[in-house]
Image (tube, grey):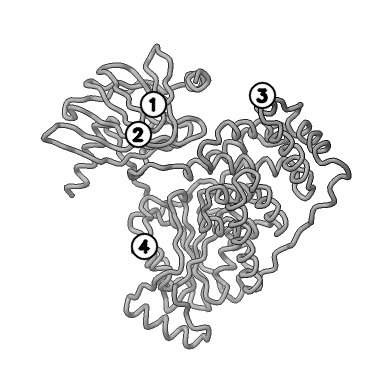
Amino acid sequence: MMKRAMACAIAASLIGGISASARDAGSGKVETQPDKILIACYSWGGNTRTAAEMIRQATGGTLFEIKPAKPYPTEYRRCTEVAKQEINAGFRPELAAEIDLEKYEVIFVGSPNWWGTMAPPVATFLTTHDLKGKTVIPFFTHGGGGMQRCEADVRKLCGKSNVLKAATFSGGSIRSAGEAMKKWLDEVISVKPAALSAKERSIAAISMYTARGDMENLKTALNAGLDAGLTVNEIKEVLVQLYAYCGFPRSLNALNNFMALVREREARGLKDVPGRLPGPLPAGDSVAFGGTNQTKLCGGEVRGAVYEFAPAIDRFLKGHLFGDIFGRDNLDWKTRELATVAALAAMDGTEPQRDSHIRVGKHNGLTDMQIAEVLALAAPLKRKDVFPQGTKIESATFNGDAWLAPLIDNRNADLAASNVTFAPGVRNNWHTHSVGQILLCTSGAGYYQERGKAARRLQPGDAVDIPAGVEHWHGAAPDSDFSHIAVMPKRSENKTVWGGPVTEAEYAAAVEKQ
């Protein structure tokens, strides 16, 4: 109770009394986007996974299989005996793999009905992950027992979550349960259309994790890409192309990861489509036709002092990148630019190249909404803040997603400090502090502006001393999340007075002048 009271006091002093609004347990329907949906399931005989795959196809969410570190016996009777012993003992088996749930808002949780309740690995999943504030939607398969205690037991384990209406399906007829599945999904979730298709989103994720060298999450993205309908050769082509942007080591690591995954899926009986191989490259000098490709791709001839300074790089770009790679015809240029923008967006120090390829991508058919979605997907990967993100701020004084993590409430010094994180493009309203405030920037890129003055771009390491009574705002850049420590001196008397929102025109002007 002491910690909770302290957190509430700090939140009130830092952001004017904002408090998180609790969701009604069991409220009927949630609205979200495909990339915010996770379908987590444990499946012994395959029926629950089939149901999960039906949900994935309907929602565009990400599928994650819950697997115990020690698999259950493959013989049915022996498996049921082990499961009964574990359930009676309240045993929670260790899981073979974990998943970061931070970016997901809605978690579908699937399990077979074992002895009237969920399978123990699912109980482990629910009790070892922080689901506070998330929406949990249970679903179950059964061999004739129906729901029994399954939904009630999930609700007991998810007391701090918004648990929606569960569904149960007969395992023996799961493949013909399409209408029942659709009816239930219509009751519990509304999926807002995403700018990127499932295949495009998978290409972006594959490119980002390759560029970051994150092989664990890359495997999940590769699985999702194959499940979404990408062919083996399309994914190979993306991974080969990326060596030109993130280097041979990461491209080769990704290809080895993918090769092992393809073999693993084959062993499980999954038949992925090989896809089309590229046709032969045009005859003649690759520098010549690569230069032609480059001009068409970019919408004009590409020149620059750096190419005069180092002519070899111009020759390599034309001959190899735009000739040998972009000349391969089993991926169109829009898709290649999608992969390139995603990879560059996920890396540090490549902003000029990222922005250049954004322009090229738009010339080849990528929309502003698609680019915005790619940047939003990449932003969390680059987050380096060592402080916790905290809980989402529920207040009209922020124009989008932001989070607050109270750090210090020193009553002797009458000082409070908290970590505040803004999603890309999010800022707070104009406001003042009666005593003033100090911002210590720790992660991402953002802006600070006082009324009547030019905006200041902020990077990690910057400090802002905000005078008492001066109207100002601060928030994230359009293409990056942003975190700062907000220090409130004389907390007990330091009052925050909120004004109106920062308009789109004011924000655009702040960004444009940097």
Tell me the CA gap for discs 4 and 1: 36 Å
Q: Which mark is residue 305?
A: 3
- The residue singled out by tag 4 in the image is 128
Asked which secondary structure carries label 3, the reply is helix
Tell me the CA gap for discs 1 and 2: 10 Å
Query: Mark 3 against mark 2, which lies toward the viewer?
Result: 3
Asked which secondary structure carries label 2, the reply is strand
Query: Mark 2 against mark 4, which lies toward the viewer?
Result: 2
Compared with residue 220, is residue 418 higher up or lower down, i.e. above or below? Answer: above
Q: Are marks 2 and 4 in contact (CB under 8 Å)?
A: no
Q: Residue at x 38, y 68 (%)?
A: 124
Query: Mark 1 against mark 2, which lies toward the viewer?
Result: 2
Instruction: Please state which of residues 421 and 318 is positioned toward the viewer in this rendering.
Output: 318
- The residue singled out by tag 1 in the image is 474
Q: Earlier in the sequence, mark 2 or mark 4?
A: 4
Tell me the CA gap for discs 2 and 4: 29 Å
Q: Are marks 4 and 3 in contact (CB under 8 Å)?
A: no
Q: Earlier in the sequence, mark 3 or mark 2?
A: 3
Tell me the CA gap for discs 1 and 3: 37 Å
Name the quadrant containing residue 157. Answer: bottom left
**Residue 313's spot in the image, x, y percent?**
69, 35
